[in-house]
Amino acid sequence: MRKPIIAGNWKMYKTIAEALEFVQAFRPLVVASTHCEIVIAPPFTAIKSVAARLDGSNIDIAAQDVAAEPGPGAFTGEVSASMIKDAGARWTIIGHSERRQFYGETDDSVNARIRAALVAGLSPILCVGERLEDRDAGRAEEVVEAQLSAGMRNLTASEASRIIIAYEPVWAIGTGRTATPETAQQMHAFIRSGIRRMFGEGVAEETRLLYGGSVKPDNIATLMSQPDIDGALVGGASLEAGSFASIVNYKEKR
Ligand code: 13P
């Protein structure tokens, strides 16, 4: 059984004070939530404070990106995987579409970041997803397949088994336009078959596939009822404690 993961990506939101205020309100709302793993990805500046406050809780911390170089070294502005771990995070998002779109992230740099994260003992959340023009041109699967195989290139099956994949169609991010559960399920099944081809049945069955893109309290249950959707990566709706807690505490509708 794959244990679901509900992860919140705060993007470039929240000062340290705001992050701690969130945590204070959020923690009691999910204290009994053992059905899933709960992860929050604050901005780098708030990781240490949030991690310290959540020590011993059922909420884990992720970074939103990680340097491709293991370091230490002369890489101004970069934050290494071991620094992220040192600050108290256990996970890191890699290859988010906003990094690909606005900051020149490529499949090669994604692959390097995944390696750096794995070496340091962080769990990578690898983001893939097509743009609207790809989908309209009937190339959604081709694009996702290319991101997946290049991002996971030259990994062993045991390394691959430590990776979580987030399918985030670019046209659904921050737009209020969620992929239908059927569209998301179809792509998740496709991704799982790609993992099966690359790393075998065992890894494919174990790998958790998260959906991201306008996930809200009112659509999480239907998304989670799909057989290949094992969790969610939530942007906007993870910024407010009550709304993120209702996503965490979804009840599957079968
Ligand atoms: P929204 O939930 O705001 O659409 O963002 C999704 C996302 O990009 C999570 O990484």
Image (cartoon, grey):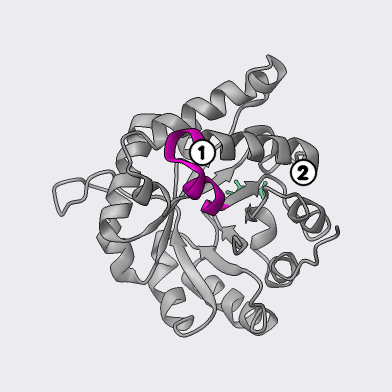
Mark number, residue 176: 2
Which residue shows up at 61% across the image and 62% down it? Answer: 1
Q: Secondary structure at mark 1?
A: helix
Q: Please indicate whether residue 137 sits to the left or right of residue 129 in the image.
A: right
Q: Residue furthest left?
A: 73
Crowd tier of the residue under label 1, counting other residues whose Cα lies within 10 Å: few below 14, some 14–19, many 20 or above: some
Q: Which of marks 1 and 2 precedes in the sequence? A: 2
Q: Residue furthest front?
A: 201
Which residue shows up at 40% across the image and 60% down it? Answer: 44
Mark number, residue 196: 1
Amino acid identity at mark 2: Gly
Question: How far is mark 2 from mark 1, CA to CA?
Answer: 32 Å
Q: Please indicate whether residue 151 sits to the left or right of residue 189 in the image.
A: left
Residue labelled 2 has its Cβ within 8 Å of some atom of ligand 1: yes
Give x and y (percent) for residue 82: 26, 61
Which residue shows up at 28% across the image and 43% down it? Answer: 68
Q: Quadrant of residue 252?
A: bottom right
Height in image: 52 above or below 166? below
Give x and y (percent) for residue 113: 33, 44
* Res. 84 visible in picture: yes
Height in image: 34 above or below 96? below
Q: Please indicate whether residue 4 sits to the left or right of residue 125 in the image.
A: right
Magenta stretch: dominant SS? helix
Residue labelled 1 has its Cβ within 8 Å of some atom of ligand 1: no
Q: Considering the image in quadrants, where does the C terminus appear?
A: bottom right
Is residue 115 found inside the magenta-colored segment of the image? no
Q: Please indicate whether residue 220 sits to the left or right of residue 150 in the image.
A: right
Amino acid identity at mark 1: Arg
Give the residues in magenta: 197-208
